[in-house]
Image (cartoon, rainbow, N blue to C red):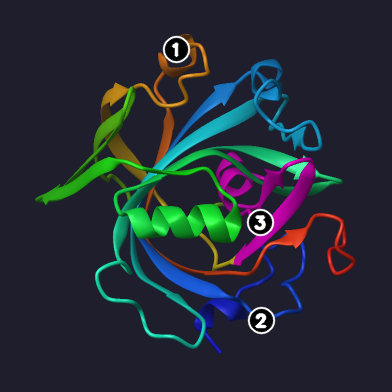
Amino acid sequence: MYDEFLETSQRPFPLPQSRWLMTQTWHNLLFCHWPVSSRILRKHVPSTLDIHLYNGTGWIGIIPFQVTNARLRGLPSPPFIHSFLEMNVRTYVTYKGTPGVYFFSLDANKRIPVWGGRLGAFLPYRHASIEMEEEGNTLHFRSNRKKETFSVSYEQATDFFIPQENSLAFWLYERYCFFTEIGNRLYVGDIHHDRWRISETKALIHKNTMASFLPRTYFHDEPLVHLSKEKRSFAWALTKAFHKERKF
């Protein structure tokens, strides 16, 4: 058993009964979050999902990171494509009371992971030009796709800590499924990892035109930012959101 499966008390619902399908490791995750009106988000999220609010406010996140060791269960990591750069734009939702994530976009710098994410998980993956460089203690990340660009420099500012339950950080990060709509059917993708270990972070956003459907005024304020150095994750095959094994 992987050590990650020894930590499950942070999950809001039990692990799936079936076997996980895919694993990958995430590195140098920068979490950038801004509060956003639920009225604005409502226009861009499927009506089957409820906008999840923290103290009456919705949130949007932009998260750049690196992926390594991506592989299917029982198979070795495929050469050349097991490692890539990614960035996702997401918000927080519930379905019949179950908290999860809804992705507006997921960018990756290699085409095969993009195709895999589209075909295997029906997620809005797109190919983008992405670079990540390390300069001393500072990481520089830049993603560019047509008119949407995100460029940021960031570094760790404090020791790592585990977010306290009921805190905003715990609410944002400890989520173990995503929802996606295929036609008029809602599907859920389960994931698992151990608890988040995060640090406060110094981040300088050089350019941000992501989530272009939102008024740019939402990004004028400084975001809430955290860094996580490494996280191994496990993912299951999609199931219908009303599947009998799901206790929604």
Percent position of residue 212, x then y: 46, 20
Asked if labels 1 and 2 touch by Cβ distance under 8 angstroms, the answer is no
Towards the viewer: 116 or 87 = 116
Q: Distance of mark 3 from mark 1, alpha carbons?
A: 28 Å
Percent position of residue 125, x then y: 47, 46
Percent position of residue 115, x then y: 44, 55
Asked if labels 2 and 3 touch by Cβ distance under 8 angstroms, the answer is no
Mark 1: few, some, or many residues within 10 Å (few <14, many ≥20)?
Answer: few
Q: Secondary structure at mark 3?
A: strand
Amino acid type at circle 3 is Cys
Residue that mark 3 sits on: 177
Quadrant housing residue 48: top right
Q: Which label lies toward us, 2 or 1? A: 2
Residue that mark 1 sits on: 216
Residue shown at the point (85%, 62%) measured from the top left: 243
Residue shown at the point (60%, 49%) measured from the top left: 170
Please state the extent of the stretch shown in magenta in the rendering.
Answer: 164-191
Amino acid type at circle 1 is Arg
Residue 185 counted in the magenta span: yes
Task: State which tag comes first along the sequence, 3 or 2.
Answer: 2
Percent position of residue 180, x then y: 67, 46
Residue that mark 2 sits on: 19
Quarter of the N terminus within the rendering: bottom right
Quarter of the C terminus within the rendering: bottom right
